[in-house]
Amino acid sequence: MSSTIATGAETGRVPAHSDMRVPIPLTVAAFTANFDRFAVGPILVTIAAAMHTPLSSTVALASGYALAYGLSQPLWGILSDRIGRLAVVRIALSIAALAGLASAVVPGMTLLAVCRCVAGFAFGAAVPSSLSFVGDAVAPERRQNALADLMAALGLGSGLAALFAGVVAHWLSWRLVFAVPSLVAITAVVLLRGVGEPERATVGGLGEQIGAVLRAPFAYVVTALGIVEGAVLLGGLTFVAPALQHRGLSSAAAGALTALYGAATLAFTRVVKALTRRMPPHNLAAIGGAVVAVGYGCAAVAPGVATYALVATLLGAGWAFLHSTLQTWATSVVPQARGTAVSFYVAALFVGSALGAALGGGAAAHGQYGTVFGVCGLATVPLTAAVVVGRRRFVARG
C-alpha cells in the first residue's frame, strides 16, 4: 500500500503532524454527538412513564443507539480514509439532524427506537473522524494533549446533556431533548464548510485498506479492550441516572448529579494533559482504572444517592485517564489506515456499551443497582491490567 502524503502546497490541506489545535467547528460536531448520546440516560424513566412501558423496554433506546453507533464505525472509518474526515462528518451530521428531529415528534416506542438507532448510526461518525483528524494533523508526541482538549469538549457535552435532559424533561418535554442537538448539528454542518481537510496517507483498494488493519496484531488487542471498556464504563454509566431516580430523585435532580460525570471528565482531562509530560501512558491508565473500581465498589457496598454521585464523578475521572490512553493508542496502531483502525476500536467500544446496558437492564428493572455496579467494578480490574500490560508492550515494540 502506498503511504505517500501530498504536501500542503499541492492540496491546500492542513499540513500533517503540525502543532494545530482541533478546529472549533469539528469540536462542536464531536460535542453534539456526545451530547445526543448522553442525553437519553436521565430521561429513560420519564419516557417509560409517558409511553406506559417498563424501564427494561426504554433501556433499549440507549442500548440500541449504542449498538447502531458502534456498528456504523467501520463504514464511517473506511469512508473517512477515502473521501476525508470532514466530508464524512458533514454527511453524517445531516442525517443525524433529520433523525433527531423525527425522534422529537414520532408517536410510539417502536418508531422512537428506530429513529434513535438512525441517529446513533449517523452521530457515530463525528467522534472517530475527529480522532482521526487529530491523528493526521498532530505529531505523535503532542497527540495525547490534543486529544485531551477534544475529550474536554466531549466531557462538557456529556455533562451538559445530563443536566439539560433532566431539567427539560422535568419542566417541559422529554421530546425537546432530541430536538436541540439536531439543531446544533445543522449549525456544525454549516460551520465545517470553511475547514480544510488534513493531509493523510493515500490508500489503495478497499481490500488493502482493511487488510492493513487486519494484519496489525495490536489492532486486535485495542479492539478487544474497547469491547470491555464500553461495557464497563459506558454500560455502567447508563444506569447512574435511573439508580438515582430509584432513590426518589426527580429526573432534574438525577440529571444534575449525573452531570458530575461530564464535570469530572472536563476537570481531569486538564490533569491528564499536564501529566502526559512526565508520566508514561500505562501509568495514566492504571490511575484511571483504579478510580473507576473504587467508585463502583462504593456504590455496590453502600448503595445510595451519595455513592451513585461518586460513581458519576469517578467514571468521569477514569474516562479521562483510562480512555484517553486507549484512544490515543488506537490512533497509532495502523497509521496508514488510521480512520479504519480507529473506527474498529470505536465500534468495539459502543458494541460493548450496548452489551453492558442490555445485560444490566434486567437487574435495573428490579432495582438491583448495587449488583450492576458491583459487576462493573469487578470487571474493571482485569480491564485495567490488560491495558497497562498491552500499552507497555506496544511502546517497547516501537
Image: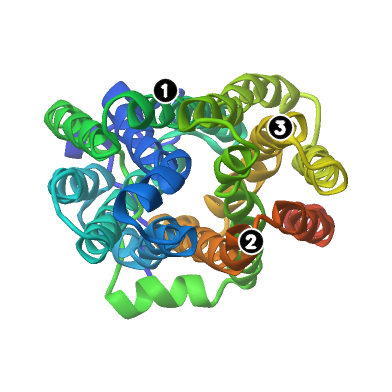
Q: CA distance from mark 2 to mark 1?
A: 47 Å
Of the residues shown, which amino acid type is indicated by label 2?
His
Residue toward you, 208 or 77:
77
Residue beneath disc 1: 21
Q: Are marks 2 and 3 in contact (CB under 8 Å)?
A: no
Q: Secondary structure at mark 2?
A: loop
Q: Position of residue 1 (x, y in %)?
A: 38, 70
Picture quadrant of residue 33: top left
- Decide: is 52 above or below 256: below
Of the residues shown, which amino acid type is indicated by label 1?
Arg
Q: What label does residue 360 carry, if any?
A: none
Q: Quadrant of the C terminus?
A: bottom right
Q: Residues within 10 Å of mark 2 (few under 14, many from 20)?
A: few
In the image: residue 124, left or right of residue 288 = left
Q: What label does residue 366 carry, if any?
A: 2
Q: What label does residue 305 carry, if any?
A: 3
- Decide: is 7 above or below 333: above
Residue toward you, 51 or 157:
51
Residue toward you, 94 or 18:
94
Q: Which residue is drawn at the image coordinates 40% and 43% (left, top)?
A: 46
The furthest residue to the right: 301
Is tag 2's residue or tag 1's residue first in the polypeptide sequence? 1
Q: Which residue is drawn at the image coordinates 23% and 33% (left, top)?
A: 176
Q: Nearer the viewer, mark 2 or mark 3?
A: 2
Q: Nearer the viewer, mark 2 or mark 1?
A: 2
In the image: residue 321, left or right of residue 87 = right
